Structure formats: C-alpha cells, structure tokens
Image (cartoon, rainbow, N blue to C red):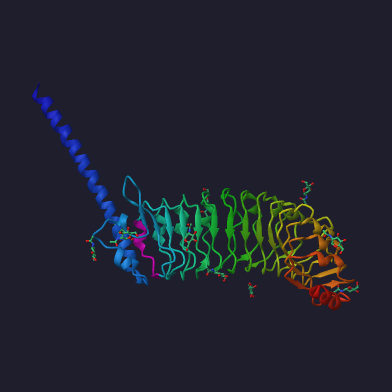
C-alpha cells in the first residue's frame, strides 16, 4: 500500500461524508423554508374560528404533522395544503411562493381577502389551485402563466378585478378554468383555445367581459362545459361552436349576442344544457332542428327575438325537463308533440304570438311543475289551464 492510496481513500471518505452532510443540511433548510412559509401564512390569518391553526400549527412538531398539510413520503416537503371551509379570515402572504414542492392547494370557502401574491407563480409544481368562494380582490397576477403544470384553476366567487392575463390561456395542462362571479373586464384573446387542447371546463360567467366569443373556441376539442353567461359579449355565437364534439353544457345567457343560433349547435348530440336567454338572437328554427339532441335536458332561449313556428321536432327530446321559449316572437300553434315529453317539469311559452289552443296532449305531462303561458296569445288558455290543474 502506498501513501498515495491511503490519501486517495481518505479523500474519498471525506468526500462521501461531506456530500451526505451537505444534502441533509440542504434538506433541513428546505424543510425550514416550508415551515417558514406556513408560519407566515398562519401569521397572515387574523381569524381562525375553530382555533385549528392556532393550536395545531406549532413549531414543536414537523409541518408534515400539521392539520391540512401533506408531505412527500421521501423528501418530506409540503406537497398539499387543504384548508377549505375553516372560516379563516386573512391574506395570502408572498412566502407561499416558497412552497416549491406544493402541487395541491385548496383554501376555498374561507374569507381570504387582499390580492394574490405574484410569488404564487413560483410554485412551479402546482397542479390544483382552488381558492373559490373567498373575498380575494385585485388583479390576477400574470405570473400564474408560469405554472406550466397547472390543471385546475378555480378563483370563482371572489372580487377579482382587471383583465384576465392571457398567459393563463397558454397553460396547455389546464383542464378546468373557473373565474365566474368576479369583476373581470376586457375581452378574450382571439387565440383563446390554441393551447388548451385538454380543457374540459371553462367558466367565466358573472363578470364584465366584452368583445366576441373567439372563433378559436372550436380548438378546445375536449370542452364539456362552456359558461360565459352574464357578461357583455357581443358579435354573435361563432358558427363553429357546433364543432365541439363533447360539449354538454353551454351557458351564454345575459349577454348582447345578436344573430342566429348556429344550426351546427343542434348537431352536438352530447348537449344536455343550453341556455341562451336574454340576448338579441333572431331567426327562426327549422322544424327538424331538435332531431339530433337525444341528451338534452334544458333548452332555454327566452327573452330573445326568435321567430317562426315552435319546431315540431321538439318531441324527439325525450329527456327534456326545462323548455323556456317565452318572450320571443314565436307564432303559430303549440305543436301537438309537446305531450310526448315525459320528463318535462318547467314549460314557459308566454310572451309570444302563438295562436290556437293548448293541445290536449299536455295532460300527458305528469312531471310538470310549472307552466307559463301568460300573454302567449292563445285563446281559451284560462279554461284549459283550470281543467288541467284540477284534473
Ligand atoms: C407544542 O407547543 C404547544 C404550544 O406552543 C403546546 O401546547 C403543546 O403541548 C406542545 N406539544 C408538544 C408535543 O410538545
Ligand atoms: C394536528 O392535527 C393533526 C391532523 O388532524 C393531528 O394528527 C395532530 O395530532 C395534531 N397535532 C397537534 C399538536 O395537535
Ligand atoms: C376544495 O374544497 C372544496 C370544499 O370547500 C371542495 O368542494 C372541492 O372539491 C375542493 N377542491 C378540489 C380541487 O379538490
Ligand atoms: C421566502 O419568501 C420570502 C418572500 O417572498 C422571501 O423574502 C424569502 O427570502 C424566501 N425564502 C425563504 C428561504 O424563506
Ligand atoms: C357563487 O356565486 C353565485 C352567483 O352569485 C351564487 O349563486 C353561488 O351561491 C355562489 N357560491 C357560493 C358557494 O357561495
Ligand atoms: C403563448 O405561447 C406561445 C408559444 O409558446 C407564445 O408565442 C405566446 O407569446 C404565448 N402567449 C402568451 C400570452 O403568453
Ligand atoms: C354589461 O352587462 C350588464 C348585464 O350583464 C348590463 O347591466 C350593463 O349595462 C352592460 N354594460 C355595457 C357597457 O353594455
Ligand atoms: C349535422 O350533421 C349531419 C350528419 O352528420 C350533417 O349532414 C349536417 O350537415 C350537419 N348540420 C350542420 C348544420 O352542421
Ligand atoms: C302576431 O300574429 C298576428 C297574426 O298572425 C300578426 O298579424 C302580427 O303581426 C303578429 N305580431 C308579431 C309581433 O309578430
Ligand atoms: C298523449 O295524449 C294524447 C291525447 O290527449 C294521446 O292520444 C296520446 O296517446 C298520449 N301520448 C302519450 C305518449 O301518452
């Protein structure tokens, strides 16, 4: 054995020793970062009605044992934080951006106020961000666009203002974008759906969004729910909305949408809910228009300027529960086939220019709970209604 060999072994040992020394020190400091971030969150909470954080989040036990906190098995870093529905009042501190292993965050149904810190964009492993039903205000930080693994973004029922940062629509992993019930303004980008091939659920209703529904909407190939109701959208319903093969729920009510209901929409056989009420839609509906909607449960188009006859194909919609055609300018008679809708519960035909009498088949509608025929223009309405309700 030479001196050089001993020296080599010594250096190797020292190296291995120092390496493990270094990694454990690093791991420990990272754990402290998580603890520091969570203690900052605890400090930003001014009310904790059940005292859970006050009593449970204490520095004498590992963060991994704290209520609502989950850690990775191997690295013992915080991967999930679930504090939903605890009545917490407080703000979200910037230190939350240091939870670098966090992938699940649910603080929904509390009273968090203040704005979202831009440091949230540093939580690069985040897949789920659920902050709905709080009092969050201010603008949505554009830094959220850096969350390239985000799948579930729910900021609904808050008081967020400003424009939706377009960078969010560039997160191709997103499956769900819910920003309904806020005070968001501005228009949607033309390329809205060019990078959202996986998105199934877009809800932006009850905001102040202006402009057109982007034509790129048809690129959201997996869309099941599109909810843009109660905004200030103009410019018409894009013709290619009927190219969404999995669309189940479409809510465009209470906007200022003019023009036709694209006939392609009536070819989306997966459609269950269609609510286009309170727009400026015109045009008539071809008599066979309802032939391809076997799943439809609600057709709500009241308060528009739709004209012509009520399509006789209505009787093909065997699952229909709600039919609301009121306050349009439909004319002619109520189709006899209306009696072939066994599940119908709500039927609103009032405020039209209908003629004739209520077809006798209406007495087949045993599920009917509410019927609106006021100012429908019918003759003999009152007598038949009384007979119907007393029979
Ligand atoms: C941890 O500290 C809290 C108060 O800071 C105390 O109530 C609790 O008993 C301590 N728990 C342990 C296991 O030492
Ligand atoms: C904190 O809560 C967790 C989860 O409910 C529980 O397992 C743990 O014992 C609690 N710790 C303290 C110090 O109360
Ligand atoms: C978050 O918690 C709420 C309860 O407030 C629950 O309904 C929701 O499903 C949770 N979000 C996620 C993404 O698991
Ligand atoms: C954590 O975040 C805060 C605020 O964003 C920052 O000042 C601090 O240096 C960060 N790092 C650690 C290790 O806590
Ligand atoms: C969210 O807002 C909508 C519309 O204002 C309201 O109907 C709904 O109850 C709210 N959700 C919650 C959980 O508060
Ligand atoms: C979206 O991504 C594309 C391609 O990666 C890029 O060119 C574009 O600027 C991005 N848009 C936004 C709003 O970040
Ligand atoms: C926007 O829509 C709301 C109803 O959703 C309406 O009260 C308001 O007048 C509209 N604003 C404009 C500028 O059209
Ligand atoms: C509806 O589908 C049928 C059969 O697939 C097709 O022939 C027709 O052109 C479609 N109509 C519209 C308006 O897309
Ligand atoms: C209602 O129908 C009558 C008779 O068909 C017609 O004379 C009248 O112009 C119609 N009114 C409207 C508002 O369409
Ligand atoms: C509905 O009622 C009509 C006449 O009132 C009757 O001839 C018809 O067989 C009934 N249809 C169904 C599906 O019950």
Residue at the image point whose x is 11% and y is 25% from the top: 4
Residue at the image point whose x is 28% and y is 52% from the top: 30
Which is nearer the eye, 178 or 71?
A: 71
Does the magenta run of residues contain 345? no
Residue 57 place in picture, x, y as percent: 30, 63
Q: Which residue, as the protein is rendered here, is positioned at the far front?
A: 391
Quadrant occupied by the N terminus: top left
Quadrant occupied by the C terminus: bottom right
Segment colored magenta: 88-98
Residue 138 place in picture, x, y as percent: 46, 69
Residue 371 place in picture, x, y as percent: 76, 72
Any part of residue 284 in sight: no
Direction from residue 359 to residue 243 in the image, left or right: left
Q: Quadrant of ligand 9?
A: bottom right
Direction from residue 93 to residue 303 in the image, left or right: right
Residue 271 drawn above or below residue 2: below
Any part of residue 251 in sight: yes
Residue 103 place in picture, x, y as percent: 42, 52
Q: How many marks?
A: 0
Residue 304 drawn above or below residue 1: below
Residue at the image point whose x is 40% and y is 69% from the top: 88
Q: Quadrant of residue 259?
A: bottom right
Q: Quadrant of residue 51?
A: bottom left
Which is nearer the eye, 123 or 363?
A: 363
């Amino acid at each position: 054995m030479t001196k050089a060999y001993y020296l080599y072994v010594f250096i190797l040992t020292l190296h291995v020793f120092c390496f493990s020394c270094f990694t454990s020190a690093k791991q420990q400091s990272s754990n402290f970062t998580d603890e520091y971030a969570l203690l900052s969150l605890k400090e930003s909470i001014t009310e904790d009605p059940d005292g859970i954080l006050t009593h449970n989040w204490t520095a004498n036990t590992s963060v991994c044992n704290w209520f609502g906190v989950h850690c990775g098995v191997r690295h013992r870093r915080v991967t999930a934080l679930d504090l939903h529905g605890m009545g917490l009042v407080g703000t979200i501190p910037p230190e939350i951006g240091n939870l670098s292993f966090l992938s699940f965050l649910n603080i929904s149904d509390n009273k968090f106020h203040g704005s979202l810190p831009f440091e949230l964009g540093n939580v690069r492993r985040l897949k789920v961000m659920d902050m709905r039903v709080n009092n969050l205000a201010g603008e949505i930080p554009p830094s959220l666009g850096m969350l390239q693994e985000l799948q579930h973004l729910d900021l609904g029922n808050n008081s967020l203002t400003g424009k939706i940062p377009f960078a969010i629509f560039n997160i191709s992993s997103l499956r769900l974008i819910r920003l309904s019930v806020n005070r968001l303004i501005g228009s949607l980008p033309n390329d809205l759906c060019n990078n959202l091939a996986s998105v199934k659920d877009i809800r932006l209703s009850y905001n102040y969004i202006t402009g057109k529904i982007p034509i790129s909407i048809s690129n959201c190939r997996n869309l099941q729910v599109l909810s843009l109701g109660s905004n200030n959208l103009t410019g018409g319903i894009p013709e290619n909305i009927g190219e969404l093969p999995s669309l189940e729920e479409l809510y465009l009510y209470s906007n200022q949408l003019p023009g036709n209901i694209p006939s392609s929409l009536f070819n989306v056989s997966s459609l269950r809910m269609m609510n286009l009420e309170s727009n400026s839609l015109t045009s008539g509906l071809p008599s066979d228009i309802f032939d391809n909607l076997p799943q439809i449960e609600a057709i709500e188009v009241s308060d528009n300027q739709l004209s012509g006859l009520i399509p006789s194909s209505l009787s093909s919609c065997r699952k229909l529960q709600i039919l609301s055609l009121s306050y349009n300018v439909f004319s002619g008679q109520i189709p006899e086939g209306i009696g072939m809708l066994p599940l119908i519960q709500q039927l609103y035909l009032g405020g039209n220019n209908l003629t004739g009498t209520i077809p006798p088949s209406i007495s087949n509608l045993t599920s009917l709970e509410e019927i609106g025929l006021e100012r429908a223009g019918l003759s003999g309405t009152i007598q038949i209604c009384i007979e119907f309700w007393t029979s």
